[in-house]
Image: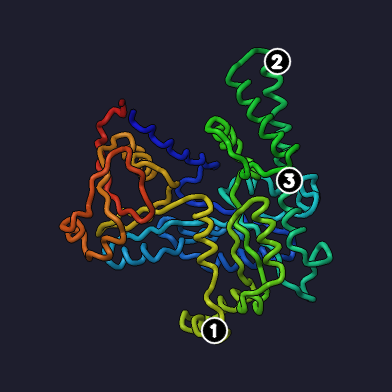
Amino acid sequence: MAPKKKAETEKKILLGRPRGSLKMGLVGLPNVGKSTTFNLLSKQAVPAENFPFCTIDPHEARMNVPDERFKWLCEHFKPKSEVSATLTIYDIAGLVPNAHQGEGLGNAFLSHIQAVDGIYHVVRAFESDDIIHTQGEVNPVNDLVTIADELRMKDIQRLEDITVEPEKFTRRGADKQKKAELDILLKILAWVKEDGKWISAGDWKAAEVEVLNSYQLLTAKPVVYLVNMSEKDFIRQKNKHLPKIAAWVKDNLDGPIIPYSAEFEQKLSELPTDEERQNYIKDVGAKCSQIDKVINTGYSALHLLHYFTCGEDEVKCWTIREGTKAPQAAGIIHTDFERGFICAEVYKFDDLKEEGSENAVKAAGKYHQKGKDYEITDGDCVFFKFNVTSSGKK
């Protein structure tokens, strides 16, 4: 008897629907360095070709995403047009204790956080006589609990409001689809309210994820923790609060943690040249700036990757979710590319860099044609073939 095939490990179905340009929101209690961090990120904004203004308003900024591969491709192809991936950052105000009940700016933050794909949570881990902590003492774990609970309570309020109408609807007429959605919403409400957990910490089925994605609930969003330390602690890479922060994050939401110093980054940003910035880093004994890491970690937290379309006319970086197949990746360029998909001609960035040219990549047998089941991987250079006259029928 032939041995049974080992069951394949099922991939966890990802929450959210990030597509194209990533949107991240900065949250935190007052006086933790949130706005300073936003301003530092805003200074990184470089005019993207198809975005005439990087800073959209005082609390929103769009910037090009740092990617050494993109820079290399632009130098290699010398295209007429260069379009990098972009990141939009929102400085979200209004998060104070009892904000879900209307304290501070109250509900003003709700729509802002709902609109983003993920959250940067700025956590204060520095002492300062000049900057008073709103809770009277620097206690990062208490701050983490405060904001986690505020967002969870806001989700509870919204879920309770959402479930009122489906309950009335299902009482009037036994709509199976509405009843199934109501059951899912009530299960989610119990998870958030009775179990006291974030939605992102759950293991949800495909049908449940479909419902969750339609409501963009706050605790379904991934969180990147930005631990703001003093310059001294950042340089010596030691802070008394870090172990407790790491323990809380691991036990609760298990998101990435980036220790950084807004104080250090501020001083660095005020230096006019890259040479002076590098000299300052060396002189004080630090390793590097963390700003690029903050931006790129936002992408990895959402399981996003980049692929490139390259040529003399244009080099462009595209953002897609892990596991996206070739036709759907083509679809973010134009719907006709997906509808009339024929194949994807693919080679790896590393192979191009190693071989030196597309012709050399082909000669080395590293240039491949891929069909509709191919999953695009990070760093793929792709040329899509499609037929615009295709009816799209299978």
The amino acid type, in three-letter code, at marker 1 is Tyr
Residue 389 location, x and y as percent? Answer: 25, 32
Whether residue 133 is visible? yes
Question: In this image, 227 relative to 302: left or right?
Answer: right
Quadrant, the C terminus: top left
Residue 350 location, x and y as percent? Answer: 31, 61
Q: Which residue is mark 1?
A: 280
The amino acid type, in three-letter code, at marker 2 is Arg
Q: Which mark is residue 171?
A: 2
Tell me the residue at 58%/51% (across/down): 118
Disc with the residue nearer the chain's start (1 vs 2): 2
Q: Which mark is residue 52?
A: none
Q: Helix, strand or loop at disc 3?
A: loop
In the image, 206 versus 313, the foreground residue is 206
Mark 1, residues whose alpha carbon is within 10 Å: few (<14), some, or many (≥20)? some
Mark 3, residues whose alpha carbon is within 10 Å: few (<14), some, or many (≥20)? some
Tell me the residue at 32%/34% (across/down): 339
Q: Is residue 174 above or below residue 106?
A: above
Tell me the residue at 26%/65% (across/down): 354
Q: Is residue 363 above or below residue 376?
A: below
Q: Residue furthest left?
A: 363
Q: Which residue is mark 3?
A: 107
Disc with the residue nearer the chain's start (2 vs 3): 3
Q: Helix, strand or loop at disc 1?
A: helix
Whether residue 90 is visible? no
